[in-house]
Amino acid sequence: MAGGLRMKEKGRRQPILGAKSNEWVVRPTTAKAVSGLVNHLNTRLDWNETDVLDLFAGTGSLGLACLNRGARRLMSVDRHPAALRHLNGLRDRSSDPRWSVVQADLLTPNDRPLSLSSLGGQPFGLILADPPYGDARQEGLVERILDGGLLTSGGLLVVEHAITYRRFSLRHQAQHELTYGLSRFCIFENN
């Protein structure tokens, strides 16, 4: 492990830090899906040169897996107060200077591209997006990300969604799809 924090320690789950009962309903990505995705990304990325943006970060498992593989920088973004308490608690415990946590509502009711200036001004080599399953506002999210200048040239956008959901983009075609149980990762490349 490269200076990160595991979501599972010796077979036990990490508690959701700062969450009260029924305050935050989570659907964490399964360990098998995280491992499969990161193993796939190993063949496409140089982690030491990759800045990662984790949108809808939730428990942080996807972004932390990248940080554990040696990503140069991780920015975790979520809007939910319990998610932010959890992410900030994990970040504080890890004391990893490569990791920052940002509060933002990514499903705002507009069609503007996401702003690079509001996310530190530097493009990312990998963007992970795990929007709430079944939320109609996620339609057009791929366009908002790819049209917003958030990705480096050749950078990858990974969108996790339910296998039953098919309409993420009308203009962009995923180059790869990985399916694990009821979840699917669509991988788009910024050309």
Image (cartoon, rainbow, N blue to C red):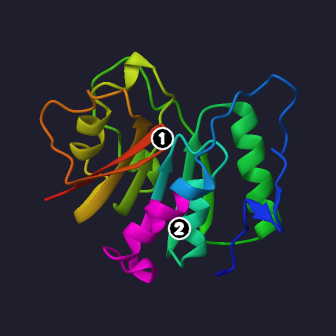
Q: Which element is circle 1 on?
A: loop
Q: Nearer the viewer, residue 130 or 91?
A: 130
Which residue is label 2 attached to? 66
Q: Which residue is depicted at the point 81% across and 66% down?
A: 9
Q: Which amino acid, by three-letter code, is at mark 1?
A: Asp
Quadrant of the rendered image containing residue 167: top left
Q: Nearer the viewer, residue 187 or 96?
A: 187
Q: Is residue 19 left or right of residue 36?
A: right
Tell me the CA gap for discs 1 and 2: 15 Å
Q: Which amino acid, by three-letter code, is at mark 2?
A: Cys
Q: Which residues are magenta?
A: 34-52
Asked if 6 appears above or below 45 in the picture, the reply is above
Asked if 15 appears above or below 106 in the picture, the reply is below
Asked if 114 appears above or below 180 in the picture, the reply is above
Which residue is label 1 attached to? 130
**Mark sitting earlier along the chain (1/2):** 2
Quadrant of the rendered image containing residue 153: bottom left
Instruction: Point out residue 152 in the picture as x, y percentages from the top left corner.
Output: 26, 63
Q: Nearer the viewer, residue 125 or 113?
A: 125
Does residue 181 appear in this view?
yes
Quadrant of the rendered image containing residue 145: top left
